[in-house]
Image (spheres, rainbow, N blue to C red):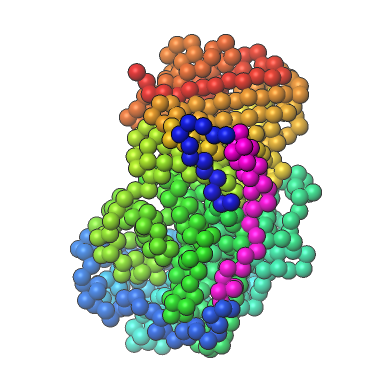
């Protein structure tokens, strides 16, 4: 049974509730992912070797000589592209110094700006020349080509673990392929395709050298190696999680030593790298490979690798990396699948598969009120999929709501008034679609409630189709999810589409973020999420630390999420049971209930944390006031049971400051005299 929502107005029978609990628990335990072979089966059934288009006839995007297309773009779009390119006419193409790379092992600084600036400059110059078409930016594009041809490696220093040589500097003798390499290679491949004739008019070695470097640094290593972990291919002893310092391996091997599933798809380290990398590789192979048979074999390898990504997903299609990462997870998987459909003349088509559909519609479910989305784990509070990506995905799976949401996001982001961003190939696709998305029906996806039983994420709002009033999202899950935070049982709560109880998100990535010291970072810890602290003990990282007996019930008047949290805490917490319940009474209030039983007590704090972007004051005993952006809420509690402590946290990290510029407040609700058993409830209502 894939639908766990129980819609009743008055009564749920005991049998229905018991069935809900059992099926939810079984779903989470057994259905996190499985070998479905959706893509490999499709390739076999259509006989990929026969139907793959091996010339360039599949490309139906505007080219350099399609001057009418470029001249007909809206003035704001044209001017935006040209002005950005003009700013780069004197760009100096700064060398990536050895010390830039070495900073990753010296201070942990990933130096993303050093690697990202030249890549962004390349894209801006290419798009500026495509729009203007006068040759004014060609010399700088050639400089970009030569810059990258002379560079040892195109990747990011955070990913040196892919090479056998010691961390800190790239090994020219072992070309490795990471996210940075993939992005640069994709953009360079399209630069070669779009301007190869222009390059040849200037000097024939430009195109020859560029193609040779992409093949040597990227395409041939992709052909010849199967052991990059993101490929997800089986190797001796399991799948390609083959390095002890792989940042996507569990951060607590000792805690997980009895839970090894390395011989299975599930838990093998598959994440958004897989579709992201394979999308970029697919573009390179289709554009640069001259040998038809090698091209067919390369595309088949992409499919065989990408096949593992949906296999790693649960049946509910939930993305445990969060909506911010969805664009480079399920969203970029869609782009790869759409490209495969295109390059097979429509024959490769898996968009009717239920899982592929759910991996798309997930994005609509977790919308609070754009640009705010439910943002558990490393996800930011704002952002997510590209409007065109959402629109195209919805169109491909024939989902009107998703398509309308993409058109809504296009209007929200003022698409059509300025230049676009992203990979060259994606911008070409999106510009071709510009008039269609601007004239499509636009409507925000504001679901009344949703439940992802396998991912254990659910939520609801006061009224379908409206962001006014209360919205909450909650999670069960476990503490070894992708981009994990120790946040089992946490929630977010918004009012009128604005943040009240929040998930802070993550700071700027450093080497520490993906190391054994990850959970020394404050935003990763459960005490900075909306979770209990028990006998002074926080949640622990690792797969065994999980929620159990998670249930979700949604009716006309109420939405209720309940989960058992005791197993998310180590033995020091001395907790037998801790049931956390989130309840939304539509149009009335939102409440958080805790019921617990301990096996022992110490002198440390037992209570709950509430993380908020509101300004919090104590209005009276038993009453706190939460003052947010355009709203005031009252939170009532029993002052004989709970004692609040209000702590302001100044935000200094530049990334977090974009979302929480005014700082964060933590409200610690301490049990005054906790016994071995106890309970409490806090209720949020609109302030009078």
The residue closer to the viewer here, 107 or 186, is 186
Q: Nearer the viewer, residue 94 or 663?
A: 663
In magenta stretch: residue 453: no
Left of 261 or right of it: where is 442? left
Percent x, y of residue 583:
50, 30
The reply, left or right, for residue 6 in relation to residue 145 is right
Which residues lie in the magenta part? 14-43
The front one of 400 and 237 is 400
Q: Residue at x 60, y 49 (%)?
A: 454
Q: On the image, which quarter does residue 17 sit in?
A: top right
Q: Is residue 41 magenta?
A: yes
Please tell me which residue is depicted at 65% across the width and 13% down the height of the picture. Answer: 673
- Give the number of marks: 0
Question: Does residue 393 sit above or below 201 in this rendering?
Answer: above
Q: Quadrant of the C terminus?
A: top left
Q: Does the image show residue 80?
A: no
Residue 486, horizontal then vertical, whole percent: 62, 39
Residue 222 percent location from the top left of the image: 60, 75
Residue at coordinates 60% horizontally, 76% vertically from top-left?
301
Q: For residue 305, which quarter of the picture?
A: bottom right
Q: What secondary structure is the stretch in magenta mostly built from? A: helix
Looking at the image, residue 502 lies above or below residue 51: above
Q: To which quarter of the image does residue 564 belong?
A: top right
**Left/right of residue 512 with respect to residue 571 in the rendered view:** left
Q: Is residue 4 visible?
A: yes
């Amino acid at each position: 049974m894939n639908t766990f929502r129980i819609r009743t107005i008055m009564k749920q029978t005991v049998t229905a509730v018991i069935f809900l609990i059992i099926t939810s628990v079984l779903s989470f335990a057994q259905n996190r992912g499985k070998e479905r072979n959706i893509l490999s089966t499709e390739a076999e059934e259509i006989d990929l070797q026969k139907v793959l288009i091996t010339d360039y006839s599949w490309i139906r995007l505007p080219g350099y000589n399609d001057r009418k297309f470029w001249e007909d773009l809206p003035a704001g779009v044209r001017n935006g592209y040209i002005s950005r390119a003009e700013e780069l006419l004197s760009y100096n193409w700064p060398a990536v110094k050895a010390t830039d790379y070495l900073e990753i092992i010296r201070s942990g600084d990933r130096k993303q700006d050093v690697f990202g600036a030249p890549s962004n400059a390349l894209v801006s110059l290419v798009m500026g020349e495509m729009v203007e078409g006068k040759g004014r930016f060609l010399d700088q594009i050639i400089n970009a080509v030569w810059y990258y041809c002379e560079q040892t490696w195109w990747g990011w220093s955070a990913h040196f673990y892919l090479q056998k040589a010691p961390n800190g500097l790239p090994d020219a003798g072992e070309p490795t392929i990471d996210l940075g390499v993939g992005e640069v290679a994709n953009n360079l491949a399209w630069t070669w395709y779009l301007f190869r004739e222009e390059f040849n008019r200037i000097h024939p070695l430009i195109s020859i050298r560029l193609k040779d470097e992409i093949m040597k640094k990227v395409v041939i290593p992709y052909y010849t190696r199967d052991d990059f972990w993101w490929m997800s291919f089986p190797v001796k002893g399991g799948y390609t999680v083959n390095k002890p310092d792989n940042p996507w391996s569990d951060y607590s091997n000792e805690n997980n030593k009895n839970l090894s599933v390395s011989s299975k798809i599930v838990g093998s380290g598959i994440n958004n790298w897989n579709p992201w990398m394979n999308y970029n590789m697919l573009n390179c192979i289709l554009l640069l490979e001259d040998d038809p048979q090698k091209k067919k074999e390369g595309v088949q390898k992409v499919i065989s690798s990408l096949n593992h990504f949906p296999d790693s997903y649960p049946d509910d299609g939930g993305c445990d990396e969060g909506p911010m990462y969805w664009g480079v997870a399920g969203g970029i998987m869609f782009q790869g699948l759409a490209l495969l459909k295109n390059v097979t003349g429509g024959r490769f088509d898996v968009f009717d598969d239920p899982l592929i559909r759910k991996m798309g519609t997930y994005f609509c479910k977790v919308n609070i009120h754009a640009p705010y989305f439910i943002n558990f784990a490393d996800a930011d509070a704002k952002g997510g999929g590209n409007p065109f990506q959402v629109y195209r995905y919805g169109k491909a799976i024939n989902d009107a709501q998703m398509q309308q949401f993409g058109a809504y996001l296009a209007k929200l982001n003022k698409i059509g008034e300025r230049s676009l961003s992203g990979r060259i190939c994606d911008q070409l696709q999106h510009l071709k679609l510009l008039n269609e998305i601007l004239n499509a029906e636009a409507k925000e996806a504001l679901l009344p409630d949703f439940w992802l039983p396998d991912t254990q994420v659910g939520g609801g709002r006061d009224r379908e189709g409206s962001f006014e009033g209360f919205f909450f999202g909650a999670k069960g899950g476990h503490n070894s999810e992708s981009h994990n935070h120790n946040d089992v049982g946490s929630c977010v709560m918004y009012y009128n589409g604005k943040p009240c109880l929040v998930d802070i998100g993550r700071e700027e990535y450093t080497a520490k973020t993906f190391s054994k010291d990850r959970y020394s970072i404050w935003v990763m810890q459960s005490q900075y999420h909306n979770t209990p602290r028990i006998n002074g003990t926080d949640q622990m990282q690792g797969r065994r630390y999980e929620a159990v007996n998670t249930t979700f019930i949604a009716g006309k008047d109420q939405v209720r999420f309940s989960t058992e949290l005791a197993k998310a805490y180590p033995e020091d917490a001395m907790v037998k049971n801790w049931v956390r319940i989130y309840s939304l009474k539509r149009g009335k209030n939102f409440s958080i209930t805790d019921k617990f039983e301990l096996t022992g007590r110490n002198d440390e704090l037992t209570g709950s944390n509430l993380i908020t972007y509101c300004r919090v004051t104590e209005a009276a005993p038993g009453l706190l006031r939460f003052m947010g952006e355009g709203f005031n809420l009252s939170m009532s509690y029993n002052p004989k049971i709970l004692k609040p402590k209000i702590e302001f946290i100044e935000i200094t990290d530049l990334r977090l400051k974009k979302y929480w510029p005014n700082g964060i407040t933590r409200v610690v609700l301490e049990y005054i005299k906790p016994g071995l058993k106890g309970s409490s409830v806090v209720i949020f209502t609109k302030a009078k």
